[in-house]
């Protein structure tokens, strides 16, 4: 051990401080998000009450933040001298910084207070985690000497929070903003209005608070559970304008811009419940009490625009942000089709249809905001019918919206559901708390690239950045929000900040494991799935084997094949396990004799198609490509509730043909498969499935209409005879897509998704 480090440890041990944790906490290579450049050494800067700090008004926010963090978190009281010094230089980008720590000084160099603030966030992570909860009971600590040069990859680094479905306290909103700032994220997208509740005080329209902010009751369980049940309890509330001003100012003090979202023209049932004249029928409706998409939509008459302009005037007074998010998503057109005022508007404006009417609606609101010096952001549906002149597109239905907008030279923000929707499940563990569906593990977030491959270098310049979304249908409290947010926000922070060439998932996992102590000190309820196991069936001409791995380094995997839970004396996994019959494999990660995390369980069904040749005439959507075509006959079923796992394959709006060819004639008795039917996520079981068996000169066909009875649609394709079909060489399966999602349903007018699971042949 370096002599000075040894002396430091001796001093700290005398002070009854855990030296080993201190050394681990201050390792600069553990910083999240990962800096561009780190050059560290074994020397230390000693931080104590002899240390001074100095900063000019140019660095008032960042300097005061650091001073408060050190003094509030410990017994250290800083003097006024220049051991810690903030230095202004115009040679560094607006949000970049240099942090240089030697044995005598800490120098923070930046061109702006914001850049210096991000240097402070890195320095913060070099101090023990107990500083976070004001429990570092000492007046001295040490910081590893290091030189860091850093700047972000993207200018927009955001997180979203929906407070319409469930509402959260002002204190929690500030805690949420604190988390963003710590991770160098600079935008908080605050989703304030919804069908299920209006959450912002508008003084000119008090019924928005009195009526629109409250629903009579709330859906219990999952939307897919039938029949729907409700809790019978009135739910709601809103943020006063004074509370909003306080939150916006608090965010600004952490260099987080708050962008409000006022949904229009759809997702407006709460407002129409308060003022029925805003709708097409003028009839009284209730604030929505279940999730999904509703037919109520703002009418396009002038009075509606007058209302919205009044609302936006008050919004603009509260939020100084350049951007105002106006929603624009999931706006059913059925009310407009049957509305005299709306049809008259189409004729007067020379519009083609209701899609162009939506474009007119968005453009009119955009012009109003542009005249006030603001710009709009909208979900990618605002592309339909023509994009408003200066709009920024937030692409959530995949990457296509971003590609289309960027090619039209519009700014885009990537937030695809496949990689950025943190309301999706994050583990295949069946004990996970209820979520909307899907499957978005930590590694998939980390692998996200916000620049679509289809864009040229010039077009890629229109990509401002990316955002994680927290939709709260199934998050009734702040603990659940944190659980769904962490650690996935850590991965996203690195996606939008760090150089993609330096990113490495195994390295990231080790840093997340270290970061847990900081999250615990901050009282953040994070999910811990770092010790979970990934498995894969491997087939070759002579063998079927099962491969396992874990992202946590230095740990051991132990397993069983008889369905029992592995313990410290179970076989150690070293190489892929030969599979000769159907088994229930269980495995767990161990550190010596200590079991870490949950037990991994995998049923492997060695049916007759495993190892056969399979082709599909369409490529699955790149966001849901799973294990590819081979994954449909690998002996492993997908999750019952997580359609985004690697076993399910997703196809958007397409019929598909699947061909399975045996390497030798095979006797077949039955074919079965299943489809996901999560209509709330635009996923529908197919209309029909057809199987043709090829044997000899025969090719009988079995046709089945698919009649889903719940979240999963099981299909059995018996040939209709009691005996096996002998010597089958090939099976051809056609899956007919559901088609267009009907009016009144979530995603109406869009193509339905088809998700198919294992095709089992016995």
Image (cartoon, rainbow, N blue to C red):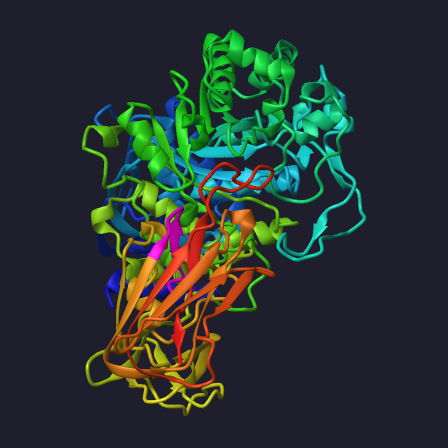
Which residue is rendered at x = 30% and y = 58% of the image?
Answer: 505
The magenta-colored residue range is 645-656
| Residue 756 sits above or below residue 91 on the image | below
Looking at the figure, which quarter contains the C terminus?
bottom left
Q: Is residue 685 magenta?
A: no
Asked whether residue 640 appears in the rendered view, the answer is: no
Asked whether residue 659 appears in the rendered view, the answer is: yes
Which residue is rendered at x = 47% and y = 61% of the image?
Answer: 675
469 horizontally vs 90: left or right: right
Which residue is rendered at x = 57% and y = 25% of the image?
Answer: 265
Q: Is residue 654 magenta?
A: yes
| Residue 749 sits above or below residue 419 on the image | above
Q: Position of residue 341 (x, y in %)?
A: 63, 14
The answer to which image quadrant residue 29 occupies is bottom left
571 horizontally vs 286: left or right: left
> How many numbered tags mark residues here?
0
Q: Position of residue 718 (x, y in %)?
A: 46, 75
747 horizontally vs 443: left or right: right
Looking at the figure, which quarter contains the N terminus?
bottom left
| Residue 292 sits above or below residue 520 on the image | above
Q: Nearer the viewer, residue 255 or 64?
A: 255
Q: Nearer the viewer, residue 112 or 459?
A: 459
559 horizontally vs 332: left or right: left
Q: Nearer the viewer, residue 501 or 278?
A: 278
Which residue is rendered at x = 56% and y = 60% of the image?
Answer: 707
Q: Position of residue 281 (x, y in %)?
A: 71, 22
């Amino acid at each position: 051990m370096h002599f000075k480090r040894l002396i430091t440890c001796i001093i700290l041990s005398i002070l009854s401080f855990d030296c080993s944790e201190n050394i681990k906490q201050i390792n600069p290579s553990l910083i999240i998000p990962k800096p561009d450049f780190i050059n560290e050494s074994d020397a230390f800067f000693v931080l104590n009450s002899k240390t001074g700090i100095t900063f000019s008004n140019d660095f008032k926010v960042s300097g005061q933040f650091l001073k408060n963090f050190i003094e509030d978190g410990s017994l250290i009281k800083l003097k006024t001298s220049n051991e810690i010094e903030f230095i202004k230089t115009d040679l560094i980008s607006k949000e970049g910084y240099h942090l240089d720590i030697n044995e005598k000084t800490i120098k923070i160099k930046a061109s702006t207070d914001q850049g210096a603030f991000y240097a402070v966030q890195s320095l913060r992570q070099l101090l023990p985690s107990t500083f976070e909860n004001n429990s570092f009971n000492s007046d001295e600590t040490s910081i590893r000497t290091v030189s860091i040069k850093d700047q972000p990859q993207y200018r927009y680094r955001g997180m979203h929070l929906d407070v319409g479905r469930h509402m959260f306290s002002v204190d929690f909103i500030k805690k949420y903003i604190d988390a963003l700032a710590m991770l160098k994220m600079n935008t908080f997208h605050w989703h304030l209005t919804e069908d299920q509740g209006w959450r912002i005080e508008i003084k000119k329209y008090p019924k928005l608070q009195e009526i629109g902010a409250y629903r009579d009751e709330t859906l219990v369980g999952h939307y897919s559970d039938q029949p729907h049940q409700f809790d019978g309890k009135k739910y709601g509330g809103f943020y006063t304008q004074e509370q909003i001003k306080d939150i916006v100012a608090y965010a600004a003090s952490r260099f987080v811009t708050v962008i409000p979202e006022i949904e229009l023209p759809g997702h407006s049932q709460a407002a129409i419940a308060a003022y029925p004249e805003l709708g097409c029928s003028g009839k009284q409706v209730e604030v929505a009490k279940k999730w999904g998409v509703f037919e109520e939509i703002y009418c396009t008459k002038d009075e509606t625009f007058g209302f919205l302009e009044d609302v936006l005037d008050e919004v603009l007074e509260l939020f100084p942000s350049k951007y105002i998010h106006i929603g624009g998503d999931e706006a059913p057109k059925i009310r407009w089709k049957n509305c005299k005022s709306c049809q008259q508007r189409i004729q007067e404006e020379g519009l083609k249809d209701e899609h162009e009417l939506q474009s007119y609606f968005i453009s009119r609101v955009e012009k109003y905001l542009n005249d006030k010096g603001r710009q709009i952001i909208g979900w990618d549906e605002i592309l339909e019918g023509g994009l408003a002149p200066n709009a920024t597109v937030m692409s959530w239905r995949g990457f296509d919206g971003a590609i289309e907008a960027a090619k039209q030279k519009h700014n885009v923000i990537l937030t695809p559901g496949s990689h950025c929707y943190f309301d999706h499940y994050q583990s295949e563990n069946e004990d996970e708390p209820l979520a909307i569906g899907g499957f978005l593990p930590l590694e998939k977030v980390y692998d996200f690239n916000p620049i679509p491959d289809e864009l040229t270098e010039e077009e890629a310049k229109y990509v401002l950045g990316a955002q994680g979304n927290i939709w709260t249908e199934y998050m009734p409290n702040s603990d659940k929000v944190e659980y769904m947010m962490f650690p996935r926000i850590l991965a996203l922070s690195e996606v939008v900040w760090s150089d993609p060439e330096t990113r490495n998932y195994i390295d990231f996992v080790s840093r997340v494991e270290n970061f847990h102590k900081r999250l615990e000190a901050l009282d953040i309820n994070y999910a811990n799935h770092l010790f979970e196991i990934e498995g894969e069936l491997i087939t070759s001409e002579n063998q079927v084997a099962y491969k396992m791995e874990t992202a946590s380094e230095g740990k051991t995997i132990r397993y069983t094949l008889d369905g029992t839970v592995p313990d410290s004396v179970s076989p150690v996994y070293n190489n892929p396990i030969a599979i000769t019959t159907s088994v229930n494999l269980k495995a767990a990660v161990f550190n010596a004799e200590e079991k870490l995390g949950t037990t991994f369980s995998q049923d492997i069904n060695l049916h007759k198609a495993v190892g056969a040749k399979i082709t599909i005439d369409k490529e699955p959507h790149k966001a849901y490509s799973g294990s590819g075509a081979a994954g449909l006959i690998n002996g492993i079923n997908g999750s019952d509730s997580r359609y985004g796992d690697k076993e399910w394959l997703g196809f958007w709006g397409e019929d598909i043909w699947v061909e399975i060819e045996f390497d030798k004639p095979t006797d077949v008795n039955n074919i079965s498969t299943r489809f996901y039917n999560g209509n709330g996520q635009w996923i529908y079981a197919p209309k029909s499935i057809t199987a043709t068996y090829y044997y000899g000169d025969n090719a009988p066909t079995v046709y089945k209409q698919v009649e889903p009875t719940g979240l999963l649609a099981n299909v059995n394709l018996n040939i209709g005879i009691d005996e096996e079909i002998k010597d089958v060489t090939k099976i051809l399966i056609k899956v007919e897509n559901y088609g267009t999602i009907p009016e009144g349903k979530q995603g109406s007018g869009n193509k339905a998704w088809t998700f198919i699971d294992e095709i089992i042949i016995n």
